[in-house]
Image (spheres, rainbow, N blue to C red):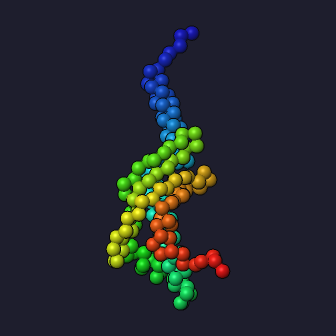
Amino acid sequence: MERRVFPGKLFRIGEVIAGLIFSAAFLLFACSKAAPKCDSGKAVDAVIHEVSQDMKKDLNFLASAGSGGLSEDEWRTLRAGITITVDNIREQNYVKDSDRRTCAGTLTIQDSSGKESIPVVYVPDTDKASGEVRVTLTGYQEHKYKKTGPLISDDK
């Protein structure tokens, strides 16, 4: 019995196999929970979010002394007048074994009263369960403390 090979069918099977391999590789690398690069949008957004939440907490504390805190609408109005950016981003260190990056940059906060540039260091990390990018930020709190001193003293 003679066996016939149809080149058209083999070509289609090859395309399907190549497509499956490409799809698997894409899913493996595109959806990985690796630490984001220092200048990735998610890492920069996480720094800005961290600073924004800290500012909101401080303003709530100050407002609570008088009227009980800020409403969400009041906070959105105040926040709309503030521009927060991270520039001069660079990677200071990368540890391959733990997939950990240490990043540095200049945090700039601009509002109607002026512009302030603060050198910061941050470590972006991806939550393995949710995929959310979080950062550990240093430099901002220290700058804020030097500028204003402690608002609440632990001394009694």
Position of residue 130 measured from the top left corner of the image (x, y, whole percent):
59, 55
Residue in the picture at 53% in, 42% down: 95
Please, is residue 148 above or below residue 123 in the view?
Answer: below
Position of residue 47 measured from the top left corner of the image (x, y, whole percent):
47, 61
Position of residue 43 measured from the top left corner of the image (x, y, whole percent):
47, 55
Residue in the picture at 50% in, 70% down: 145
Quarter that holds the C terminus: bottom right
Please, is residue 50 above or below residue 102 in the view?
Answer: below
**Residue at the right extreme?**
156
Quarter that holds the N terminus: top right
**Residue at the bottom extreme?**
66
Please, is residue 15 above or below residue 26 in the view?
Answer: above
Position of residue 82 measured from the top left corner of the image (x, y, whole percent):
39, 73
120 or 22: nearer the viewer: 120
Please, is residue 15 above or below residue 117 in the view?
Answer: above
77 or 92: nearer the viewer: 92
Position of 132 with respect to 79 (left or right) is: right
Residue in the picture at 58% in, 39% down: 97
54 or 17: nearer the viewer: 54
Work out whether residue 125 can be spotted. yes
Work out whether residue 41 can be spotted. no
Residue in the picture at 44% in, 47% down: 91
148 or 73: nearer the viewer: 148
